[in-house]
Image: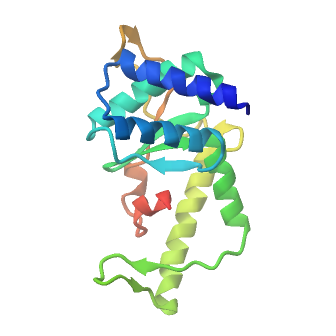
């Protein structure tokens, strides 16, 4: 991927932010640019977005910017918005698929921290087996949705056919909202940790 292509993609994103009149503060705008660069270059497959507003407005604005941007820049085509409960993520479909596949095929020593203890405390080896098994279940679930050649078409996504951005009806194929909230409700792993 050429630097000029990445710079052009960022110009497109910034233009689309202006088109939808999303009032991002300069620091939040820089974070959005950095996150998109990290996704497009393969530095990160998934990024939790915790700037630029609150749900559901943040979700709508991200989807609108992404949809408009994808019309003008092919580099941005693999990017999607994903929601799990009140957490929102930007992700690169192939990047996340490859990451999940790699993590499932590799022996990795998992170390867990109990976030509810103050100060934070490592979870004992005996207790880790349950948490590790839950994490593997989440990874396997993700591997059925995020495929190296795109999204699993049999999974029901939330197309945004009823939303209008900049006077145009959104297209469900160009920027599907991946809403996994109902799929992850019974999970025992803290989902925001997927960001790490």
Tell me which residue sits at (67%, 65%) in the image.
104
Tell me which residue sits at (71%, 60%) in the image.
102
Residue situated furthest front in the rendering: 26
Front-most of 181 and 12?
A: 12
Quarter where residue 28 is shown: top left
Can you give x and y, in whole percent of width and height, for residue 62 in the image?
40, 32
Can you give x and y, in whole percent of width and height, for residue 167 in the image?
36, 7
Q: Is residue 156 visible?
A: no
Residue 30 in the image: above or below residue 116: above
Q: Is residue 14 left or right of residue 21?
A: right
Q: Is residue 20 left or right of residue 98?
A: left
Q: Is residue 20 left or right of residue 1?
A: left
Residue situated furthest top in the rendering: 167
Tell me which residue sits at (71%, 75%) in the image.
107
Quadrant containing the N terminus is: top right
Q: Is residue 56 visible?
A: yes
Tell me which residue sits at (32%, 32%) in the image.
24
Residue 20 in the image: above or below residue 123: above
Front-most of 58 and 140?
A: 58
Can you give x and y, in whole percent of width and height, for residue 25 in the image?
31, 35
């Amino acid at each position: 991927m050429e630097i000029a292509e990445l710079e052009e993609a960022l110009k497109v994103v910034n233009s689309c932010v202006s088109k939808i009149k999303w009032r991002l503060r300069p620091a939040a705008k820089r974070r959005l640019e950095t996150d998109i660069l990290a996704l497009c270059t393969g530095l990160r497959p998934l990024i939790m977005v915790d700037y630029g507003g609150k749900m559901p407005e943040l979700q709508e604005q991200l989807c609108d910017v992404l949809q408009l941007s994808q019309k003008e820049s092919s580099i941005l085509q693999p990017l999607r918005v994903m929601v799990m409960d009140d957490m929102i993520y930007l992700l690169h479909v192939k990047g996340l698929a490859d990451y999940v596949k790699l993590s499932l095929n590799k022996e990795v020593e998992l170390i867990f921290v109990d976030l509810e203890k103050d100060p934070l405390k490592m979870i004992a080896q005996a207790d880790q087996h349950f948490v590790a098994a839950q994490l593997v279940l989440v990874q396997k679930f993700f591997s059925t949705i995020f495929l190296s050649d795109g999204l699993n078409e049999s999974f029901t996504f939330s197309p945004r056919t009823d939303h209008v951005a900049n006077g145009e009806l959104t297209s469900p194929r160009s920027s599907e909202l991946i809403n996994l909230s109902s799929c992850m409700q019974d999970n025992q792993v803290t989902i925001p940790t997927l960001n790490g």
